[in-house]
Amino acid sequence: MNGEQIRDGLRKSSLLHIEDVYKRYGSKTILDDIDLSVASGEFVTLVGPSGCGKSTLLRLVIGQEAPCGGSILMEGEPLGPPTPERGVVYQNYSLFPHLTSIENVTLSRRLALQPWQWHSRKKTILEEGMHYLEKVSMADHAQKFPAQLSGGQRQRVAIAQALIQKSRILCMDEPFSALDPGTRESLQMFLLELWEETKMTFFFVTHDLEEAVYLGTRLIALSQYYTDDRNPEAPRGAKIVVDRKFGPSDHAVSPSVKSTAEFASAVQEIRKQAFDPHYLQHVTSFDLSHPMSWVTHNAGEVAGEQPVQPGPGR
């Protein structure tokens, strides 16, 4: 199977397909020819150095921004503006302070209805909201306002808020970064248990490399630290320099896995590949070992021909 056939197959079979995507702000290139296909049910973690465009890529997936070039498809169709099929959990708790937990969770359902529809369906929707609060272990706090909850509890409610929309992809933008270490680890374990139960597709952005290795069944690293064969003055942005599979043997709910030599080795290797400005890999040497990984090289990036290069799993 040649490169074009691989790419065509991924366009049709992937839940999310990103091809030849660029993002620029003025003269500055942030994302430089991003190629990524995500299967349904993957837990994708996204890491990279500060300023590499992690949150920019997430906004493109959500639909809050549009790429300057290339295409983003969801189940083979062009991605449009934000919709409930792409749920979002942010760092700063996307809850309304004047609403209780159950009111926050069910708000999207209520806003989608006319007043008379809400009154006729209120009981059913509130029962559905309680179901999701129970799923995140927050049913006992249904009548509390956000100010009465801890940071970890507010994030659990925010996750329930996204779950009730039955999103195809749950996008999370550094959701645990403001939490203390104990609460953070507790929520990491909770999120893995939730993923095991629901098999939802997660797209999780974090600045914490250990968190990314622990949570992800697939780790994507963006980085602006690399070399290619273009003119040194050519504008460059971040590329995917690591695309690795983790699990199921590497993927465990217990945080004890973080103390193993294998875990430490993986963290150290990815830190070198993506975070070290003095370790500049050539674009042909990136660690794209995930079975669904693939890449195109554009004019000048690689001397000679620029074929589609599938990952080793293909």
Image: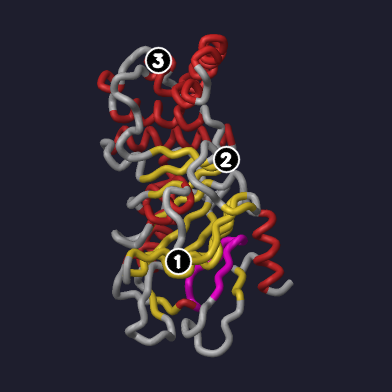
- State the CA–CA distance, disc 1 to disc 2: 24 Å
Callout 1 crowding tier (Cα within 10 Å): few <14, some 14–19, many ≥20:
many
Does residue 115 appear to the left or right of 237 in the view shown? Answer: right
Q: Is residue 264 left or right of residue 127?
A: left
Query: Where does residue 190 sit, x and y in percent of width and height?
Result: 44, 32
Q: Please report the bounds of the magenta region as a residue range.
A: 284-296
Residue beneath the point at 55% across and 15% down? 117
Marked residue nearer the N-terminal end (3 or 1): 1
Residue 111, given in percent of the width and then of the height, sits at 47, 24
> Relative to 15, does residue 3 appear above or below in the rendering?
below
* Residue holding disc 3: 142
Q: Label 2 sits on what residue type?
A: Arg
- Residue type, label 3: Ala
User: For mark 1, what is the residue?
Assistant: 22
Check the image and report above or below for 189 versus 32: above
Give whichever of 184, 125 is nearer the camera. Answer: 125
Q: Which residue is mark 2?
A: 168
